[in-house]
Image: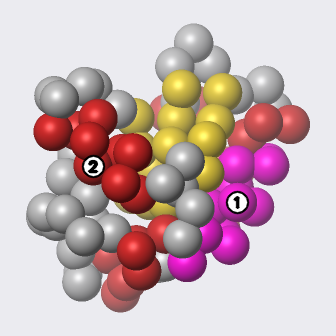
Amino acid sequence: MKPSDIERRLKDEEKLNIIDVREENEIKTGKIPGAKHIPLGKILTRLDELDKEKEYIMVCRSGNRSSLASEWLTEKGFKVKNMVGGMSNWESDME
């Protein structure tokens, strides 16, 4: 999934479940509004915060860590998409 697809869906006021797997110091530079922060190293220990009925969009700086998180969550039975290119390609608002 491309950043522009996510931007468009957010502008259409669609409720998205976005998880940012970057580290704390990276989050301080800004994140997608409404995104939940779960660092990659903690994702498997925080599965109880996720719902297998929902779809999640995984985000990191470049798309590599979020791709890994997507694989792990898919293996655990979650519906997941990766934001290709990560926050490096994000051109919309941040919080």
Residue shown at the point (19%, 63%) measured from the top left: 92
Looking at the image, residue 17 lies above or below residue 33:
above
Q: Residues within 10 Å of mark 2 (few under 14, many from 20)?
A: some
Nearer the observer, disc 1 or disc 2?
A: 2
For residue 22, say whether it is visible.
Answer: no
Depth order, front residue of 48/28: 28
For residue 83, say whether it is visible.
Answer: yes
Horizontal side of 4 relative to 52 (left or right) equals left
Q: Which secondary structure lies at badge 1?
A: helix
Magenta-colored span: 62-72
Q: Residue 67's x, y, as percent?
A: 70, 60
Looking at the image, residue 79 lies above or below residue 66:
above
Looking at the image, residue 93 lies above or below residue 71:
below
Q: Which secondary structure lies at badge 2?
A: helix
The residue labelled by disc 2 is: 7
Q: Quadrant of the C terminus?
A: bottom left
Q: As shown in the figure, which amino acid type bears the numbered disc 1?
A: Ser
Q: As shown in the figure, which amino acid type bears the numbered disc 2?
A: Glu
Q: Main secondary structure of the magenta part?
A: helix
Comes first in the chain, label 1 or label 2:
2
Say which quarter of the image contains residue 93: bottom left
The residue labelled by disc 1 is: 67
Residue shown at the point (29%, 35%) measured from the top left: 9
Say which quarter of the image contains residue 53: top right
User: Are the residues tagged 1 and 2 within 8 Å (C-beta)?
Assistant: no
Q: Residue 4's x, y, as percent?
A: 36, 54
Looking at the image, residue 33 lies above or below residue 57:
below
